[in-house]
Amino acid sequence: MAVALALTGTMSVAGSAFAATGAVHRDSIPKGVHLTVWSWWGKPEITVEQQLANKWAKAHGDTVSVILQTQSFQFFATAARSGKGPDVIFGMPHDNNGVFQQEGLLAPVTNLNPKMYNPYTMEAVTIAGKQWAYPVSVQSIALFYNKKLIHTPPKTWAQFVKDANAHGFGFAQHNLYYDYAYIGGMGGYVFKDNHGTLDPNNIGLDNAGSVKAFALLHSMDWTYHWMTPSTTGNISVANFQSGKVGMILDGPWDVSKMLSSKIDLGVAQLPSLPNGKPATPFLGVITAAVSSRSHNIPAAQSLAQYMANEGQMSYFKVNADLPAIVSLQKSKVVQTNQYDAGFIAALKYAFPMPNIPQMSSVWSADTIIGNIIKGQISAKAGATQFVKNIKTAIQVQG
């Protein structure tokens, strides 16, 4: 998220949260080692990361380098295999961890207290019954609305339709990440969740609920006429910034952009769907993880946990990144931020993006959604083809 906030109290926040986890004792960490952290979080978070790393290093008699990584996430895997990767990877969205865990490139985390987090946050960092990353921040999409046009955000589908008809609506309609709010809420799913284990052989993107959701997406263009099939996420954002539409679906990463456009921005939980059920946006968890190729895994685990837990309110203060720790989400500082309070409300029904490796095959196949929206294929036939394409991609993936 990019709401500009003052950097204050960077080293003094969340101390009690860290103490409650039972972190690795200092005496068990060797002195004189050097650790490397690769961070996919940019400025200003990386400044906080280095400050926290320095504090940890001073306490343990070690040194730490925090390096801003601009390569793709997969670059970590390439480097780790060759023995040239970092000890800690930071700022990694949780859905990437499944691929790395499958390849044996991650070390399990230690001393992670599940009571500190929402169950779905824990599910996001759990693979095969073990936790492989420390949650740092959580994010999801919510309803952005122009307060000058819409004084009270709609809570029901009927209210939403009325406001959208009057003031317009748009979002990245061709993208499964955004569409899942409707798919999950209408009864669809990506992979069947069997008591915390995702089954890649049971794909629910062609069930009755998913078909209804795809039909609903089509109707937004052809029945309600809120968008045209060529409307993209960028077009929707631009239309909202200019005041052409009164509502969009968007995430915390675009708040600062809206505020710079002088929009009287409101952020709220998504309204209920035509079936009366809540919308279910994807939950994303920004994580810290430890490379299994590190020569100092206990030290790396201690460092990753410290940077993850101790920094959560500091990341919030510099860039309004929502804390993953529930007690911090409930803090006055977070709750009185009108934008983040809206995102926290949106998280109530959020569902974690699948973190198993097969999810990459889903992303590669979601172009079929654009064909459904264009009317080139029906919702039912498109859903059937979507799942067929996913299964083919999974077979190729191996």
Image (spheres, rainbow, N blue to C red):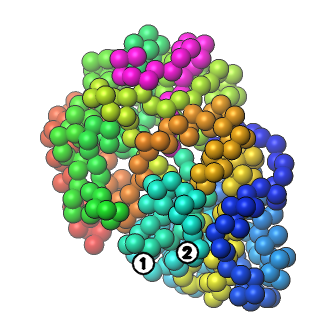
Give the image location of residue 175, x and y in percent.
39, 41
Name the secondary structure under disc 2: loop
Given the image, on which type of amino acid does mark 1 rest? Glu
**Is residue 362 visible from the viewing direction of this image?**
yes
Crowding at dot 2, Cα within 10 Å, few <14 / some 14-19 / many 20+, comes out as many
Magenta region: 140-159
Position of 48 relative to 140 (above/below): below
**Which quarter of the rendering shows the N terminus?**
top right
Which residue in the protein does label 2 denote? 109
Q: Taking 269 as reference, is 25 left or right?
A: right
Nearer the viewer's eye, disc 2 or disc 1? 2
Q: Tell me how far mark 2 sits from mark 1, CA to CA.
A: 16 Å
Label at residue 314 = none
Residue at point 72% right, 86% down? 29
Which residue in the protein does label 1 denote? 103
Q: Taking 220 as reference, is 153 left or right?
A: right
Name the secondary structure under disc 1: loop
Crowding at dot 1, Cα within 10 Å, few <14 / some 14-19 / many 20+, comes out as few
Give the image location of residue 64, x and y in percent.
76, 75
